[in-house]
Image: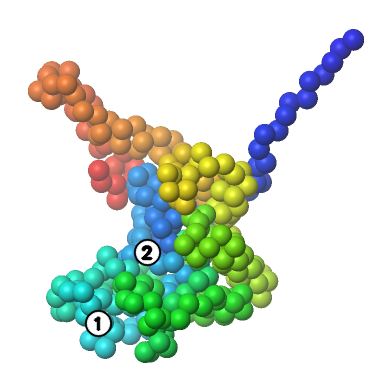
Amino acid sequence: MLFVVKKMKLQTKIPLTPQENQIDYSSEVLLLGSCFVENMGAKLEYYKFKTFQNPFGILFHPIAIEKLVARALNDRVFSEKDIFFHNGQWHCFEVHSEMSSTLKEELLIKLNTQLFCLKEYFLKATHIVFTYGTSWVYRFKETKNIVANCYKIPQQKFTKELLSVSEITTSLNKMFSIIIEVNPKVIFINTVSPVRHLKDGFVENTVSKAHLISGLQQFRNQQSLFVNRQSTYFASFEIMMDELRDYRFYKEDMIHPNNTAVQIIWEAFNKVWISSETQTLQKEIEAIQKGLLHRPFNPESEEHQLFLKKLDIRIKTLQKKINHLTF
């Protein structure tokens, strides 16, 4: 008697379909949002795509992103009323702490320089990747404004709120509308960060992610077919939660995806959003990147000098194909 052993499936796979208007080496990609957008941004930079990433640092929630987009596109420069002094440094509630400075004038120059650069990139961007991390926000009681960062100011000076689905949808509508006014053909790639915000609580993190996903879905349902072709959703959160539902895909903090998970999600993004015509170039760039990291036993040896000459020839050959390429 013949027995047929059926192969077991130990993993579900999210179906991925390559999109239209994919990213290639002529594309200008703007990335804004939570720390996961920096994972994808780092991959794009590694493979030498043209990118501009988080000019004001990591932004975790939709309101923080919307505020900076509106400020840049409406030419509302930062002034002294937008900054404050705390713990020996000058800060701005609208940006990440990496922008902070010990000098007031230096902070304002940095803020307004980045604001100008952001507007310039909005005008030429072909693709904008947004990654939203949480629906939880903090409102500064004194001004009643929602902030991007609390700067370790005592918690009693803030109220913690959960953005509703409708508030998220309204924010997305405002933001995308003003971007399309200045750049009608840009492609929006929306994604929800798979990073777990467990400081809010396990249930609270789940509710937060659900609000983001529902807000994005509601936004798409409200848009015209024309806008829907420009605004898409990439399932990074779903890949992490479903395909990679195992703690071996997390860093030791059990919160952030580890390098293996990031690589798997990048490969999915590559399949969906990166032109297949770039694959050969990506492989050549990766080989060069690995060559540049090579550490010889004897840097002065004839063998290593020959290796460097060959590597230089490969770089120059590639630069003829991709004008903006630098290593």
- Camera-near label (2 vs 1) is 1
| In-image side of 30 versus 326 (left or right) | right
Residue at (66% x, 38% y) in the render = 11
Q: Secondary structure at mark 2?
A: loop
Relative to 160, residue 277 above or below:
above
Residue 113: in sight, yes or no?
no
Q: Quadrant of residue 313?
A: top left
Left or right: 306 with respect to 269?
left
* Residue type (three-letter) at the residue carrying disc 2: Ile
**Residue placed farthest to the top in the image?**
1
Q: Do the residues under discs 2 and 1 have CB atoms within 8 angstroms? A: no
Residue 286 vs 137, above or below: the answer is: above
Q: Earlier in the sequence, mark 2 or mark 1?
A: 2
Residue 176: x, y in percent?
51, 74
Picture residue at 70% right of the left edge, 33% below the top = 9
Residue 20 point in image, percent of width and height: 58, 54
Residue 161 can be seen, yes or no? yes
Q: CA distance from mark 2 to mark 1?
A: 19 Å
Binning the other alpha carbons within 10 Å of mark 2 as few (below 14), some (14 to 19) or many (20 upward) gives many
**Residue closest to the eye, 51 or 102:** 102
**Which of the two residues, 324 or 215, is positioned nearer the viewer here?**
215
Q: Where's the C terminus, which quadrant?
A: top left
Disc 1 marks a residue whose amino acid type is Phe
Residue 214 quadrant: bottom right
> Residue at point 51% right, 46% down?
265
Could you say where residue 59 lies in the image, as x and y percent from the top left? 40, 67
Numbered circle sitting on residue 58: 2
- At 15% from the left edge and 79% from the top edge, which residue is drawn? 105
Q: Which residue is mark 1?
A: 84
